[in-house]
Image (cartoon, rainbow, N blue to C red):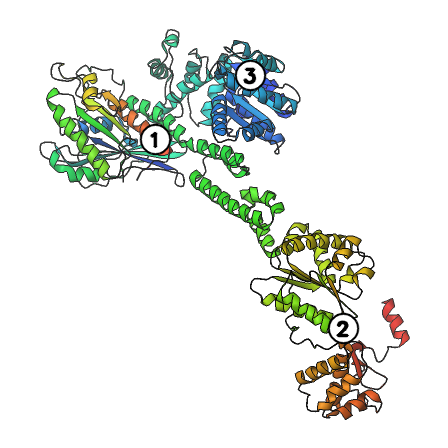
Amino acid sequence: MTRLNPRYRFENYVVGSANRLAVTAARAVAESPGMVYNPLFVYGGSGLGKTHLLMAIGHLAQEINPQLTVEYLTLDEFVEAFHAAIAAGQGEAYRRRYAETGLLLVDDVQFLTHRREMQAELLRLTNAVLSSGRQIILSSDRPPNEIEALDERLIQRFAGGLVIDIAGPDYETRIAILRRQAEERKATFGPEVIDTVAQLGLRSIRELIGAFNRLIAFQAVHPTPLTSAEARELLSRTLPATVRAMPPAAAAPMEPALAAAAPGGATATVEAPPAGSTPEAAAPPFELGAGMSDEFGAFLSEISSAVARQVEAWRGRVAEAVVRWEGEGYRTDRLQRLLQGEAPVDPDLVLRLYEEDIARLEALGKEMLELDTALAAHPALHDPDRLAEAEAEVARAREGLAPPPGPAPIWSLEDFAESASNRYAVRAARSVVDDPGSHYNPLVIVGASGSGKSHLLHGIGNALGKRAGLVVACLRAEDFVEDLIKAIDRDRVAWWRARYRRIGAFLLDDVHLLAGKERTQEEIFWLYNLLAEGGQQMVFTSTTPPESLEGIEPRLRTRLEAGLVVELPPPDREVREVIAARLLREKGADGDPDLAAYLASRASESVRALQGLVHRVLEAAEAERERPSAGFARQVLEGAPAAPTRRTTGNRTSGLLSPTGSLRSREKMIWDWPDAGDRLIEELR
Amino acid sequence: MSLVNFTTREITCKIVYYGPGRSGKTTNLQYIYGRVPEARRGRMVSLATQTDRTLFFDFLPIDLGVISGFTTRFQLYTVPGQVYYNATRKLVLQGADGVVFVADSQARRLEDNLESLQNLQANLLGQGVDVRNFPVVLQYNKQDLPADLILTHADLDDALNFRNYRSFPGDALRGAGVFETLKGISELVLKRLAAGGAGAA
């Protein structure tokens, strides 16, 4: 409800003997809120500039410290907003809001009379503000002890700060005020006219300005400059009787329209002359306006203040929205900035857009709650000015909930070569696929490197994935660790966990590599418990049986042992032959049925080594332009050296020659080292 | 039609003077015309018969100038009072933000007043306007006539003002009550405009 009138500042507050003390105190408070006079209680008759002074304090304090929150409200607004907040069940939020305001300005507290409930509320608020070192400033038309039926404790609180009065302006101050008004309104009057108004005896600044406004309105429709006598005559008609008894005077409404008006365009077809009205002969039964345009001038003045009130009505709507949305926990900075300025181009549009943003935030908040409870409290989700950030945050959460990596599709369970040696493991795998989470959970496959663990694991994963709706996470332990490190680095562990909470099966390759990774082990421990409880299948592979795993916490190790541990031996000849035949078939080199048998007969501890043999033979055959056969393979692998690989051109090439002369790997090597002297010069450069 | 337009910083209010024939609607406008400084008024447009009876409508635009940063314009219209011009009345009533019902205070015109008031309500309802919330004020015109010919303010309130509208005694010929009435309706209209209410459909 900060709606400081931008015109009410110290710069245009006319200081005279009657208000000098109050202004000095006010400035001191604005410069050091909460440090000097707290609370500051300003009182004085109506129309003497209390509101102006309060708002000036607000402006100055905010200029000095732009971070300071400033709230201005009248007691009536305070009461209304409080009732609304109570009705909406937001009483606490309302209290907190004002208690946390850096500088609170409460106008017109004389209306506390006989309102015990609000007195108690204001007492509570004052205590809260004072105890937290924040500043409260109040104004009233009378001193605290003259406010009827005011709680004694409140009187004491107010007296504990500074209670100071503003008296009516003296003649010189009145002249200064009128001159400043004329300057601000760009109106030109002779000094005798201003003197006439100042001598009216009006003690209230509001009345004084009202009378002056009347002169401005009159001048706006009269081509000749107003004289002192005319001013006296004009003002004498509407002056309150009490003042009229003294010198001539007037009182007029505020805010008359000043700008010259262009005639509106008539659109009809036939024109009639203005009716010959202005009857002045017969005495009217009611009091008629005095002058020709005077009646219109009075109408204009009154309508002007009605228009001003209604034009400003948008502030009320925005203020209501501030109370409402703050109560709901949303930031309202955008609306508060609106209240501090002049009428925006379209306040209702601003409000509507704000509320649309809120609606979007509500939707995002709801979604985030489902995605990740921990992230639902993200501040951007409660600040319409950070909507884009909130969108991005939710998008990241959504992305985070994309399933973790799944099994590689090239490895299927059907392709896994089964033999007597690995039958036990393969059957366990099939059993897991047929009835996941029921029999062997977890299944731990133990085997040496290259024994086909990964193939079997991914084969299980693919088979499980074919089951409707089963999301399978299948990844290497190193990748799992890396993923967690990234999540920790980005402070997104919550959504990282959430990814795994939604999976239907968890397959982790090379669990032995988790040795010493304490945090990862802890995460897997909790994940294990969660998945086991939900009946989700888990499969692990390891080079070492669980009981021999080193660097793995006992609580995780024992859990791995709790399921079925199967050993996957190195591929026996039968398996090797099946694999070799398949590899040759895939390369289109299955012409010689003995080739697969020969390759399988070569001792190799792993499938990977067998693959190496197949590649060597096929590459050599290609280089020699030979048909791959068992005989050729024997020649390549057992002695008769293949023709040395020819260097083509240049100093460098790829590949490392094996002792037999065939290509052993594709690592790059340097064939010709540069001269040592050249290197030295290169380094010196 | 009327609005507080924050984009163009304009306020435009359409006020329609309604009532039975010869009750003084045009006289109200003429009096206002005579009091508005030339610079602030547009041409008053009337379409009248030879006997000075309004045939179509009167239109008086008033420019109140810039108030609180808003160019404020009032457009005052009258409708023809005669029963058979209802189509015109409906037309003029469209988009109105407020209505001044000018009643003839003469006792013998009471029936005409009632009939016209009912006609106003029927036409507003016909345009989808909720008459309970629509700005209307009553002006009891011709209060300057001899007391034995007219009904008093209180009598007229009893007879016509069952919706408890604001009502003003008037003597439009001499101007008594004219600006009070205009001020009364203007305040209601402005209040409603600021609250976001729309004019007649």
At label 2, the amino acid type is Ser
At label 3, the amino acid type is Val
- Residue neighbourhood size for the residue with mark 1, other residues' Cα within 10 Å, grouped as few (<14), some (14–19), many (≥20): many
Chain ID of residue with mark 1: B
- Residue neighbourhood size for the residue with mark 3, other residues' Cα within 10 Å, grouped as few (<14), some (14–19), many (≥20): many
- Quickly name the residue at label 3: A42
Residue B42 screen position, x and y as percent? 26, 35
Residue A151 screen position, x and y as percent? 55, 13
Q: Is residue A68 left or right of residue B110?
A: right
User: Are the two marked residues, 2 and 3, in contact with CB atoms closer than 8 angstroms?
Assistant: no
Residue A478 screen position, x and y as percent? 74, 62
Q: Identify the residue at horizontal 58%, vertical 48% (top origin).
A: A389
Q: Work out whether residue A423 or residue A667 is closer to the camera in this orientation and state it.
A: A423
The disc at residue B190 is 1
Q: CA distance from mark 2 to mark 3?
A: 90 Å
The disc at residue A451 is 2
Q: CA distance from mark 2 to mark 1?
A: 88 Å
**Circle 1 SS class:** helix
Q: Work out whether residue A86 or residue A69 is closer to the camera in this orientation and state it.
A: A86
A197 up-or-down from A643: above or below: above
Q: Work out whether residue A29 or residue B126 is closer to the camera in this orientation and state it.
A: B126
Residue A598 visible in this rendered orientation of the protein? yes
